[in-house]
Image: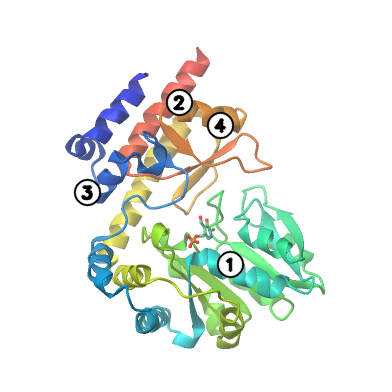
């Protein structure tokens, strides 16, 4: 057992020591780390782009309170959640569709626009669900490489739109790179393609930005463009296991998407999401703690001379300088479970920001890995 692993194991075993080592650690994050945080029996999970601080206190209380009502379908609760989301976005409830995670909503859009041999324009690499599901229903997928800064190449994507294009997918910030296009560039892009194809903007990670609203495409929904903005409670809100997401779109588009919906979300998720929406203290704390974790990790990468993409999200994409499968194996041995490889970046790795204490431990493991590689 190497030094970093034994220290991590010790921290995981003792919440008090973990808190001392980490600074801003919430009790639930300590619990997650102590349980191995589902990265394996004794591994720190930095693989799923979740928020290890979640759920927040308000969501936890709402889940507990909602358990005795689970015998009912949460029809009115879902309507209330829709209304709260609409209010916070300056839209009407008819502009909102709640889904079982944002995955369900991305799937609905892929199917709705992919049927009848539709064409999808997407970046590569990006979150692949939309392309995968569009292909599964017979669509053609045009994959456009990222630009030299690993951002969506909006100019190339606009040029790729043809008479057959039905849907354009933009993930902002992008998974796995964390890179962003500005709200201004995105809105110009939407204006340029509006009327030729629908635009699906995946804002799963936008909440991690302090100025998220400035970069959202929701203004184009308000303006009546054929734009679907998809968000989730799985990331900043720390509710990935409860599967709640939402889409914001023109009411006629919401109606067409809703017709394909399989079922409605469950009571506990709806209750937790509604409570978490109002828990701005938890959101702020998570945002700050994740930003702190990002600073720790980029400082290590800078010291080690490793390149990384500029991230606005709760993960970093960096060049390990070796085949990524080898690097992932080495970090697994040191107790960390990281993201899978993302072609065509064969030596790049995605690491999710865990708690501050977990990222301090990751920092030590990273430095030790490169020190032993240099020997
Ligand atoms: C960009 C992006 N969109 C959507 C999702 C799906 O999230 P969920 O279905 O949990 O809302 C993910 C999950 O990692 C993601 O990275």
Nearer to the camera, 209 or 127: 127
- Which residue position holds label 4? 320
Query: Relative to 341, does residue 251 appear above or below in the rendering?
Result: below
Give the CA separation, mark 1 to mark 2.
Answer: 35 Å
> Neighbour class for label 1 at 10 Å: few (<14), some, many (≥20)?
many
Give the CA separation, mark 1 to mark 4.
Answer: 31 Å
Q: Is residue 51 left or right of residue 31?
A: right
- Which residue position holds label 3? 27
Q: Residue at x 44, y 70 (%)?
A: 213
Quadrant (top left, top right, bottom left, bottom right) of the N terminus:
top left
Query: Relative to 359, does residue 152 appear above or below in the rendering?
Result: below
Quarter of the view holding residue 9? top left
Give the CA separation, mark 1 to mark 3.
Answer: 33 Å
Looking at the image, do the residues carrying marks 3 and 4 touch, with CB atoms under 8 Å apart?
A: no
> Which mark sits nearer the N-terminus, 3 or 4?
3
> Which mark sits nearer the N-terminus, 2 or 4?
4
Residue 110 lies, in percent from the top left, at 66, 68
Q: Secondary structure at mark 4?
A: loop
> Looking at this rendering, what residue extends furthest in the front direction?
71
């Amino acid at each position: 057992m190497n030094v970093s692993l034994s220290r991590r194991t010790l921290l995981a075993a003792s919440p008090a020591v973990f808190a001392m080592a980490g600074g801003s650690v919430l009790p639930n994050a300590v619990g997650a780390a102590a349980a191995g945080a589902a990265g394996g029996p004794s591994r720190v999970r930095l693989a799923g782009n979740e928020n290890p601080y979640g759920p927040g206190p308000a969501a936890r209380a709402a889940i507990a309170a909602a358990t005795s009502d689970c015998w009912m379908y949460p029809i009115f609760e879902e309507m209330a959640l829709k209304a709260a989301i609409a209010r916070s976005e300056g839209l009407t409830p008819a502009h909102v569709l709640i889904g079982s995670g944002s995955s369900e909503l991305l799937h609905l859009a892929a199917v709705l626009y992919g049927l009848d041999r539709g064409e999808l324009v997407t970046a590569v690499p990006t979150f692949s669900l939309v392309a995968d599901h569009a292909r599964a229903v017979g669509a053609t997928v045009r994959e456009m490489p990222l630009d030299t800064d690993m951002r969506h190449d909006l100019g190339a994507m606009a040029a790729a739109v043809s008479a057959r294009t039905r849907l354009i997918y933009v993930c902002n910030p992008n998974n796995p790179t964390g890179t962003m296009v500005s709200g201004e560039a995105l809105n110009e892009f939407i204006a340029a393609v509006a009327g030729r194809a629908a635009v699906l903007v995946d804002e799963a990670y936008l909440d991690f930005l302090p100025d998220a609203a400035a970069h959202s495409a929701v203004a184009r929904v308000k303006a009546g463009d054929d734009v679907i903005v998809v968000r989730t409670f799985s990331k900043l809100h720390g509710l990935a296991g409860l599967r709640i997401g939402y889409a914001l779109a023109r009411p006629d588009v919401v109606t067409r998407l809703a017709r394909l919906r399989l079922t409605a979300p469950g009571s506990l998720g709806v209750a937790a999401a509604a409570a978490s929406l109002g828990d701005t203290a938890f959101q702020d704390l998570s945002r700050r703690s994740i930003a702190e974790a990002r600073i720790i990790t980029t400082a290590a990468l800078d010291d080690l001379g490793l390149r990384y993409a500029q991230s606005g999200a709760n993960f970093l994409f960096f060049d390990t300088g070796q085949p990524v499968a080898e690097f992932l194996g080495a970090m697994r041995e040191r107790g960390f479970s990281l993201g899978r490889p993302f072609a065509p970046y064969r030596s790049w790795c995605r690491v999710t920001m865990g708690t501050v204490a977990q990222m301090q431990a990751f920092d030590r493991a990273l430095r030790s890995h490169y020190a032993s590689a240099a020997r």
